[in-house]
Image (cartoon, rainbow, N blue to C red):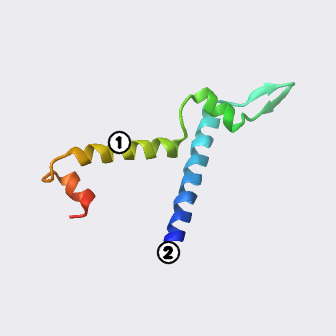
Amino acid sequence: MVARSGYFHRLHEKILNAFDRKVLRKIYAPVLDNGQWQKRCNYEMYRLYKEMELTRNIRLRILQWVGRVRRMKDERVAKKAMKGY
């Protein structure tokens, strides 16, 4: 079961990253190249956007939140929820 959960985790990451690129493609419209409209490549979009991938950003925010919760007092609801009480 552990292997499957890792598989689904990676699958959800791929889906989120694909959605992120789809939104960026709408924001950064195609470019006219030699009289033909060309879609931008993934690296071009991320270079223009100047931000990290969505899933990487989410992971970073989760780690920041966990750090905050670890510093809380044990009576706080968030700390109890993280510990599973």
Whether pointer 2 and pointer 1 mark residues with C-beta atoms closer than 8 Å, the reply is: no
Residue found farthest to the left: 75
Residue found farthest to the right: 34
Name the element at disc 2: loop
Question: In front: 34, or 83?
Answer: 83
Quarter placement of the C terminus: bottom left
Identify the amino acid type marked 2.
Met
Residue 40 lies, in percent from the top left, at 72, 34
Structural distance between the alpha carbons of marks 2 and 1 = 28 Å
- Of the image marks 2 and 1, the number of the one nearer the N terminus: 2
Residue 22 lies, in percent from the top left, at 62, 42
Look at 52% across and 64% down and name the residue there: 6
Question: In front: 33, or 10?
Answer: 10
Rendered position, 56 above or below 1: above
Look at 51% across and 46% down and name the residue there: 55
Residue 2 lies, in percent from the top left, at 49, 71
Look at 68% across and 38% down and name the residue there: 42
Label 1 Cα neighbours within 10 Å, binned few <14 / some 14-19 / many ≥20: few
**Residue 74: mark in rendering:** none
Q: Which residue is mark 1?
A: 64
**Residue 1: mark in rendering:** 2
**Number of numbered labels in the structure image:** 2
In the image, taking residue 47 as reference, residue 78 lies left or right, namely: left
Identify the amino acid type marked 1.
Gln
Rendered position, 66 above or below 40: below
Label 2 Cα neighbours within 10 Å, binned few <14 / some 14-19 / many ≥20: few
Residue 24 lies, in percent from the top left, at 60, 36
Residue found farthest to the bottom: 1
Question: In front: 39, or 67?
Answer: 67
Rendered position, 61 above or below 5: above
